[in-house]
Image (tube, rainbow, N blue to C red):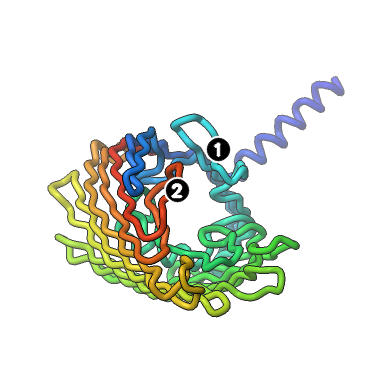
């Protein structure tokens, strides 16, 4: 009898926990493509990944605590569908691992996540910072140790409420915990209303043992005309005496009910480094990219992208890697044809 009562008590406890959990969702993306990289005549043909969207497997959920307050969690792993491995970083929950509390005050989020300066760049890239045409193919760390160009570990973030007239923003602080390149502070604020989306972001990372700052500033805007969406951004990166100015302009054009043409042009202008280095005054680069997406359904799409980077001076920006590596001042070309499925 005691064992029966104990079993009933445990079942009741689990049932109560399940009912309190408002929702739990399993989600993911599998994106694979046929890709060719040509770096100054050295060609690599491969089964590539993440040409349209980043491959991932995730779990997210929320619990309604009452009074407009919600608790949430988000666990998201980066995958390589070509060989079944996890992201090369070695972190299983590479993309995101957070717990949060949300209410009328906004949201407080703890854990590994995007940085505000990264979301400000990706938001105005016609290729969504994926594939051979992504604008961050031209971003330099300027010889600093920077582990926060996209995400940060040990991050504490605050997000503004979602109902304040189109204004959005967030602040983030990440503890370095003794690792050079991890300590970060930054923020982003913007406005999205109707066809217009504009924002500005700033962040800095301790990029060496003496805590000199790698500083990133981005201003971006997008406007949807219906038949055409224009996107543009200007980013400035500074570390010690070295600097990069990164310009990007792009467009997406709907084709019928299922198609989308994407195109962009980017330019990296570097200065301050020693002559003959990748941060010298003449170590600049241009990126041209064009692509097409055909949606077979809301979850499945075929796509193709071609991109070319033209380097100057000693610059070695590339759309992908080869062995041997791309020599300074040479061109890098990439072509990918792929399939993306989301679930």
* Relative vertical location of residue 92 with respect to residue 213 in this rendering, above or below: above
On the question of residue 218 being in view, the answer is no
Classify the position of the C terminus by image quarter: top left
On the image, the x and y values in percent for residue 322 come to: 43, 43
Judge whether 273 appears above or below 90 on screen. Answer: below
**Count of numbered circles on the image:** 2
Q: Which residue is mark 2?
A: 325
For disc 2, the neighbor class at 10 Å (few under 14, some 14 to 19, many from 20) is few
Asked if residue 282 lies left or right of residue 241, the reply is: left
How much space separates mark 1 and mark 2, taking CA atoms?
Answer: 24 Å
Residue 234 location, x and y as percent? 37, 73
Dot 1 or dot 2, earlier in sequence: 1
The quadrant in which residue 3 appears is top right
290 lies left or right of 275 = left
What residue lies at 72% left-to-right and 36% top-to-bottom? 13
Residue at 61% x, 41% y: name it: 92
Label 1: few (<14), some (14–19) or many (≥20) C-alpha neighbours in 10 Å: some
Judging by the rendered image, the residue that carries numbered circle 1 is 86
The residue that appears at 75% across and 62% down in the rendered structure is: 178
**Looking at the image, is mark 1 or mark 2 nearer the viewer?**
2
268, 231: nearer the viewer: 268
- Residue at image coords 54%, 79%: 241
Dot 1: what SS? strand
């Amino acid at each position: 009898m005691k064992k029966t009562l104990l079993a009933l008590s445990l079942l009741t406890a689990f049932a109560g926990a399940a009912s309190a959990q408002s929702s739990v969702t399993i989600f993911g993306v599998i994106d694979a493509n046929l890709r060719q990289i040509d770096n100054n005549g050295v060609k690599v043909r491969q089964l590539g990944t993440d040409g349209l969207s980043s491959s991932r497997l995730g779990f997210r959920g929320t619990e309604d605590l009452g009074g407009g307050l919600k608790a949430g969690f988000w666990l998201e792993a980066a995958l390589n569908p070509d060989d079944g491995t996890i992201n090369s970083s070695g972190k299983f929950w590479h993309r995101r691992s957070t717990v949060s509390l949300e209410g009328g005050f906004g949201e407080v989020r703890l854990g590994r996540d995007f940085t505000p300066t990264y979301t400000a760049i990706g938001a105005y890239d016609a290729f969504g910072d994926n594939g051979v045409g992504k604008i961050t193919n031209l971003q330099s760390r300027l010889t600093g140790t920077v582990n926060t160009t996209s995400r940060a570990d040990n991050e504490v973030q605050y997000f503004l409420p979602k109902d304040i007239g189109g204004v959005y923003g967030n602040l983030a602080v990440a503890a370095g915990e003794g690792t050079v390149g991890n300590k970060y502070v930054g923020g982003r604020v913007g406005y999205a209303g109707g066809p217009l989306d504009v924002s500005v972001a700033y962040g800095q990372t301790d990029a060496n043992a003496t805590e000199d700052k790698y500083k990133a500033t981005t201003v971006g805007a997008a406007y949807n005309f219906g038949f055409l969406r224009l996107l543009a951004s200007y980013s400035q990166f500074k570390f010690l005496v070295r600097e990069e100015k990164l310009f990007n302009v792009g467009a997406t054009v709907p084709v019928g009910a299922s198609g989308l043409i994407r195109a962009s042009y980017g330019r990296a202008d570097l200065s301050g480094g020693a002559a003959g280095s990748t941060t010298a005054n003449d170590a600049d680069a241009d990126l041209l990219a064009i692509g097409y997406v055909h949606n077979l359904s809301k979850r499945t799409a075929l796509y193709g992208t071609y991109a070319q980077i033209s380097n100057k001076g000693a610059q070695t920006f590339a759309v992908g890697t080869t062995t041997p590596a791309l020599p300074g001042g040479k061109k890098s070309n990439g072509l990918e044809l792929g399939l993306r499925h989301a679930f």
